[in-house]
Image (tube, helix red, strand yellow):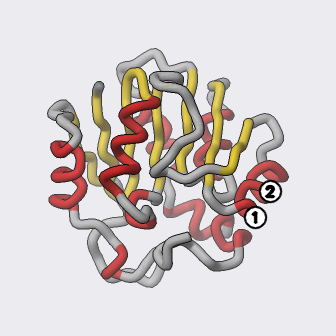
């Protein structure tokens, strides 16, 4: 695992103050807007916070994470979702098998963000959504040197030949919606 990966207590990922900052309802609504989405892959699922939010909408959700401890925690919290161990850079799924691929606070942790995005493109049918921390020094979230500048995310997206995307600035994060 990368030194950028979350190495803290998994319970911190579900702390009430963190959950409030994630704007789950707004992220889910923005991710699903203007599309008929039925299946979602939550890459870097962690404890399954976003997977749970999508599953609560009645969607078929699969979560994947490189950390077996996170997968075990996610399974305890969200038993209705299928979880698998796997890396963002080498997803263990067939081509074009999910309507939406969601990368929530994971691209900045990737060993190779370009390859992680390429894998997301490979397994997605309609849309990719990337959620990242703002490029600001903040008490919560990763240190500034681990965060991605918006220009870096946009360069990664364009590097995959993806030109139909938009960036939405939420209260506590940046959301990139990419159309395939």
Mark 1 in CB contact with mark 2 (< 8 angstroms): yes
Which residue lies at the image location 62% right of the left edge and 54% below the top edge? 65
146 with respect to 1 (left or right): left
- Per the model, the C-alpha gap separating discs 1 and 2 is 5 Å
Say few, some or many: other residues with alpha carbon within 10 Å of mark 1 (under 14 / 14 to 19 / 20 or more): some
Where residue 113 is drawn, which disc sits there? Answer: none
- 14 vs 43, nearest the viewer: 43
Q: Residue furthest top?
A: 36
**Above/below status of 104 relative to 119:** below
47 up-or-down from 54: above or below: below
Crowdedness near tag 2: few (<14), some (14–19) or many (≥20) residues, C-alpha within 10 Å: some
Quadrant where the N terminus is found in the figure: bottom right
Mark 1 — residue?
A: 69
Residue at point 46% right, 22% down? 96
**How many numbered circles does the render carry?**
2
Q: How far from the left and from the top, in percent, is residue 17? A: 59, 70
Q: Position of residue 105 (x, y in %)?
A: 46, 59
Mark 1, secondary structure of its residue: helix
List the residue tagged with mark 2: 72
Residue under the point 19% across and 31% down: 164
């Amino acid at each position: 695992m990368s030194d950028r990966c979350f190495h803290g207590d998994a319970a911190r990922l579900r702390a009430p103050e963190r959950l409030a900052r994630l704007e789950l309802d707004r992220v889910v609504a923005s991710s699903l807007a203007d599309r008929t989405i039925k299946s979602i892959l939550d890459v870097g699922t962690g404890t399954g916070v976003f997977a749970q939010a999508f599953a609560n909408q009645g969607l078929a959700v699969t979560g994947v994470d490189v950390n077996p401890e996170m997968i075990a925690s996610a399974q305890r919290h969200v038993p209705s979702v299928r979880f698998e161990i796997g890396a963002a850079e080498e997803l263990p799924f067939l081509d074009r098998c999910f309507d939406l691929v969601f990368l929530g606070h994971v691209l900045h942790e990737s060993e190779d963000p370009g390859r992680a995005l390429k894998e997301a493109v490979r397994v997605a049918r309609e849309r990719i959504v990337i959620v990242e921390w703002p490029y600001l020094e903040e008490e919560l979230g990763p240190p500034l040197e681990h965060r991605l500048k918006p220009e870096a995310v946009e360069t990664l997206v364009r590097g995959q030949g993806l030109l139909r995307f938009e960036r939405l600035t939420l209260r506590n994060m940046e959301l990139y919606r990419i159309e395939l």
